[in-house]
Amino acid sequence: MAEDLTIDRAIPKEKQYQSLIPQIEGLLFGETDFVANMANVSAALKEQFNWFWVGFYLVKDEELVLGPFQGPVACTRIKKGKGVCGSAWLQQKTLIVPDVDEFPGHIACASASKSEIVLPLIKDNQVIGVLDVDSEFPDYFDSIDQAYLEQVIYVLLNR
């Protein structure tokens, strides 16, 4: 298991992901505990990109329940179809929200969050959770983030 990451924020975002994903693979290698792996993925993403908030919510009893994360305190439970996270779960697709204040029913866990990307974790054709990333800057996330964060999820779910 790797214990340190090589971080370079001076290179383009796509190159940052290309450098980070193999490091995440190394970090997770040999570890079978899903919670531990989510914790390390959250930490690695936060360390590389310095996002406002990054973490996981897990489906439990028809709600999303807060899982491992990095950032300020967060909402603990989210109902299916509510907010960006609950909507990504319901729709079973990635949602990129350039301005959270314009998202109908947005749940403001932190007023400093301005944009968001939420990706469902799908295992055996069921959503088991979501990866939620918030930025304090509007219109921050794009298709590059989506493509590479989907790769990160693939690595996480196939350990």
Image: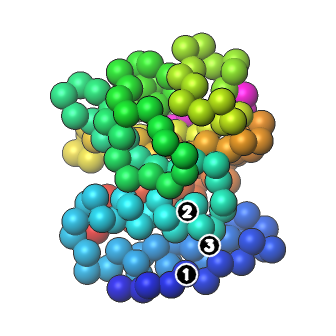
Q: If you read the primary sequence from the N terminus, does the residue marked by circle 3 or circle 1 appear first? A: 1
Residue 28, picture quadrant: bottom left
Given the image, on which type of amino acid does mark 3 rest?
A: Gln
Q: Is residue 16 left or right of residue 88?
A: right
Q: Nearer the viewer, mark 3 or mark 1?
A: 1
Q: Provide the secondary structure element on which disc 1 rests.
A: loop
Pointer 1 residue: 5
Question: Residue at position x 66%, y 36% from top?
Answer: 113
> Which region shows up in magenta?
94-99
Residue 120, picture quadrant: top left
Pointer 3 residue: 18
Question: Foreground: 79 or 142?
Answer: 79
Question: Foreground: 125 or 104?
Answer: 104
Disc 1/disc 2 C-alpha distance (Å): 10 Å
For residue 138, above or below residue 44: above
Given the image, on which type of amino acid does mark 2 rest?
A: Leu
Given the image, on which type of amino acid does mark 1 rest?
A: Leu
Question: Residue at position x 63%, y 19% from top?
Answer: 103
Residue 2 position, x and y percent, is 42, 86
For residue 73, above or below residue 70: above
Residue 96, picture quadrant: top right
Res 45 label = 2
Q: Is residue 144 visible?
A: yes
**Image quadrant where one finds the N terminus:** bottom left
Q: If you read the primary sequence from the N terminus, does the residue marked by circle 3 or circle 2 appear first? A: 3
